[in-house]
């Protein structure tokens, strides 16, 4: 190795620290691997002679700091024996305190706000751990290894008679305000909501320095708040021009040459069933009665993979977005409109390229044969769910006979699925009627009926059977082929036990001795509470006991559906994992060997993260619209149900519109109230009055805070 430099300048030292962080990040991916300096240099993309010299210097520094060990001359490994130091991702809560998630640790490490240093929400951090006063494990941030973001949404507060101000971030993603000089305010006025980018955060400085990159408008205004949500979650308003240009160049013509490569199903009765306001139709069903008396059901999915190919900027953009995001008043699509609403959309009376799962079922919905491959279809009719439901209920209308046949088969599939261990959560979703200015003028609930279940069952069948086809041999043995699965872990046993103990106070029994008994008990519980006063509370707690579904290359199964193998295959217009599944299925149909699993696992993690982000953004937009709707009802009294309980208060939901408001314990002046986590309740210390999850009570709407997206309620005796 080259000789260690005798003198390292302050500027160079800062540079070496950055290189050191990159080296540690690389080595942390495989903690047991031994690297030479060339492997490290290649791994962090430092390849020219000058850069390699810097890598050598950074390695010397890491050795001196005991962050790495030299196992033999020129070969290095992470030093995992530095007692009490860990690396992980930091997650802040509303109080400003944080938790660091560390791979391999069951519990996250608590970090007090004063010990978070200059960490920001989602940063990869290096922490030192200790047991504070002999209690639970705590940590302090030593350094930030990798920033998750540098731009934030907040409100600018200009200091009177000074040439500077501060941006106060909307959410507790950053522990302090951001200093902005007058020259970097970009015309922002005091009190406006802005996007600010951090330019520098000097060591030992409380406030980072930043510049306003965009002025969103005054807080509380509709467009300001919706654009703030988009910016908060880093969701793009539009597609880059080069992506739109590439999409516009796509050949929309159906070519004879391509048709010859596909199974032609244009003569088979085919239709779509979607929400009445849908613009992209990525799934269709075909049905025909076979000579042997069985049914041939085709599940046809838009063949996005034909138009969006790996290595293109169109594919790169779709991957980065990973999912379409459905805010209350707009969609942030994964694909440009020319693809999502036109080229790929299975619009009626148009020939379309599809990727299909074709099943032969008998009248008992038992699978006789299956086929997977590329097809071409022609949709004969576009139905809304309401139109399909009318045909199921009234037994009349165009193609009523075929829709009823599909419904009969779907009901059998659903019954068998529940019998085999699926859990039947069937919660309604809140929706808004908006006027021409996107102001909420009404609230309604999306409730699943037979037509919704019909589509759901055939999509589940396709997802399941595609996954099994790739994962199992004809002898039902695992192939170990690389694939992207939708997985759902078993519930947390501690949460299940807590649920069992809690529902027993209402007279309900649960058997959680094994997974099968647990699912049977959960389904019976959900059925038994229907229409009861405790229905909402118990259903909420049951859902909270469940794990979150994610994407993975490890087929651990889907607990909620009761499937051993399950993938997402049916929505490639709006979900990137489905596009991955299409490509892999075609690869295997062509006789290809199993590709590198690691690459796909990284894609699965990215898609899971983006899905969570989309869900959070959608939830924020619903909260905003609910608060906006309730602005007109300040001072009015409603019947509510306690939907959540915490140390500082409890939330009450108004069943008729889904709006949720907070009642703070400090506002209850009739007694001093304490929180009991076990019973999900607060109770008065002197008089014993209790407010418990699921209780009904009358409330008055006191305040609607559009900026915080929060309603404040008061109990009306």
Image (spheres, helix red, strand yellow):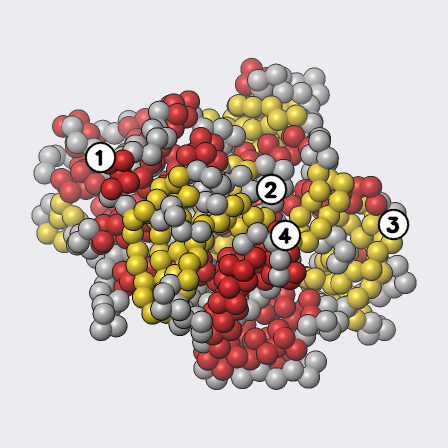
Q: CA distance from mark 4 to mark 2?
A: 11 Å
Point out the image quarter for the N terminus. top left
Mark 1 neighbour class, 10 Å CA radius: few under 14, some 14 to 19, many 20 or more: few
Query: Is residue 500 in sight in this rendering?
Result: yes
Q: Closer to us: mark 4 or mark 3?
A: 4
Q: Secondary structure at mark 4?
A: helix
In contact (CB < 8 Å): disc 2 and disc 3: no
Give the residue pinned by disc 4.
386
Picture coordinates of residue 560, whole percent (x, y): 48, 67
How many angstroms separate mark 4 from mark 3 (CA)?
A: 34 Å
- Outermost residue, right side: 717
Q: Secondary structure at mark 2?
A: loop
| Label 2 crowd (10 A; few <14 / some 14-19 / many >=20) | few
List the single residue furthest toward the front. 291
Residue 418 is situated, as x and y percent measured from the top left of the image, at 50, 73
Q: Nearer the viewer, mark 4 or mark 2?
A: 4
Residue 659 position in % (x across, y down)? 73, 52
Residue located at (73% from left, 68% from top) = 694
Name the residue beneath numbered marker 1: 45
Q: Say above or below: 298 vs 235.
A: below
CA gap, disc 1 to disc 2? 48 Å
Residue 118 or residue 303, whichever sits in front = 303
398 sits to left or right of 346: right
Query: What residue appears at the point 42 percent right and 58 percent down from the top-left corner?
Result: 288
Disc 1, disc 2: CB below 8 Å? no
């Amino acid at each position: 190795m080259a000789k260690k430099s005798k003198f390292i300048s302050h500027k160079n030292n800062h540079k070496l620290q950055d290189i050191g962080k990159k080296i540690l990040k690389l080595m942390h991916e495989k903690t047991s691997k031994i690297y030479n300096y060339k492997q490290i240099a290649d791994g962090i993309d430092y390849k020219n002679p000058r850069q390699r010299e810097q890598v050598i210097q950074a390695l010397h520094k890491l050795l001196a700091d005991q962050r790495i060990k030299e196992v033999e001359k020129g070969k290095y490994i992470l030093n995992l024996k530095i007692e009490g130091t860990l690396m992980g991702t930091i997650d802040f809560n509303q109080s400003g305190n944080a938790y660091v998630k560390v791979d391999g640790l069951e519990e996250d490490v608590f970090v007090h706000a004063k010990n978070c240093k200059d960490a920001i929400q989602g940063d990869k951090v290096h922490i030192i751990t200790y047991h504070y006063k002999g209690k639970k494990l705590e940590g302090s941030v030593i350094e930030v290894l990798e920033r998750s973001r540098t731009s934030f949404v907040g409100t600018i507060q200009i200091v009177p008679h000074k040439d500077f101000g501060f941006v106060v971030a909307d959410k507790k993603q950053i522990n302090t305000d951001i200093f902005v000089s007058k020259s970097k305010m970009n015309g922002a006025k005091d009190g406006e909501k802005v996007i600010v980018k951090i330019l520098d955060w000097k060591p030992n400085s409380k406030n980072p320095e930043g510049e306003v990159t965009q002025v969103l408008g005054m807080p509380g205004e509709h467009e300001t708040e919706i654009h703030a949500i988009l910016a908060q979650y880093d969701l793009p308003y539009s597609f880059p021009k080069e992506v739109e240009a590439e999409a516009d160049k796509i050949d929309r013509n159906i070519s004879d040459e391509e048709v010859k490569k596909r199974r032609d199903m244009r003569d088979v009765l085919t239709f779509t069933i979607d929400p009445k306001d849908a613009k992209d139709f990525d799934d269709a069903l075909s049905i025909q009665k076979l000579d042997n008396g069985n049914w041939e059901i085709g599940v046809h999915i838009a063949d996005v993979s034909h138009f969006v190919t790996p290595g293109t900027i169109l594919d790169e953009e779709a991957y980065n977005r990973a999912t379409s995001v459905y805010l209350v008043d707009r969609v942030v699509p994964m694909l440009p409109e020319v693809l999502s609403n036109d080229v790929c959309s299975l619009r009626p009376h148009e020939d379309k390229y599809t990727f299909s799962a074709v099943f032969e079922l008998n009248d008992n919905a038992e699978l006789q044969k299956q086929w997977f491959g590329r097809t071409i279809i022609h949709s004969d009719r576009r139905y809304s769910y309401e139109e399909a439901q009318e045909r199921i209920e009234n037994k009349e209308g165009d193609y009523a006979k075929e829709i009823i046949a599909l419904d009969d088969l779907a009901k059998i599939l659903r019954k068998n699925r529940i019998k085999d261990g699926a859990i039947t959560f069937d919660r309604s979703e809140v929706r808004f009627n908006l006027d021409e200015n996107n102001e909420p003028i009404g609230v309604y609930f999306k409730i699943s009926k037979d037509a919704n279940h019909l589509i759901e069952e055939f999509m589940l069948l396709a997802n399941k059977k595609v996954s099994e086809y790739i994962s199992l041999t004809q002898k039902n043995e695992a192939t170990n082929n690389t694939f992207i699965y939708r997985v759902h872990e078993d519930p947390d046993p501690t949460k299940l036990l807590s649920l069992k103990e809690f529902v027993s106070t209402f007279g309900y029994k649960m058997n959680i001795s094994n997974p099968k008994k647990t699912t049977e008990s959960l389904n019976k519980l959900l059925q038994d509470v229907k229409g009861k006063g405790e229905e909402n509370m118990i259903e909420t707690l049951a859902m909270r006991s469940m794990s979150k579904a994610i994407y993975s290359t490890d087929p651990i199964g889907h607990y909620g559906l009761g499937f051993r193998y399950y993938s997402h295959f049916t929505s490639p217009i709006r979900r990137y994992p489905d596009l991955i599944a299409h490509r892999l299925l075609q690869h295997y149909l062509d006789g290809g060997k199993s590709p590198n699993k690691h690459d796909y696992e990284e894609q699965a993690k990215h898609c899971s993260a983006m899905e969570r982000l989309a869900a959070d953004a959608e939830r924020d937009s619903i909260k905003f619209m609910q608060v906006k709707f309730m602005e007109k009802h300040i001072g009015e009294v409603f019947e509510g149900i306690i939907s959540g309980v915490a140390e500082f208060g409890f939330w009450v939901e108004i069943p008729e519109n889904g709006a949720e408001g907070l009642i703070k314990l400090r506002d209850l002046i009739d007694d001093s109230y304490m929180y009991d986590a076990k019973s999900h309740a607060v109770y008065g210390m002197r008089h014993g009055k209790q407010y418990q999850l699921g209780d009904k009570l009358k409330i008055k709407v006191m305040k609607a805070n559009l900026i915080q997206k929060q309603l404040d309620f008061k109990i009306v005796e």
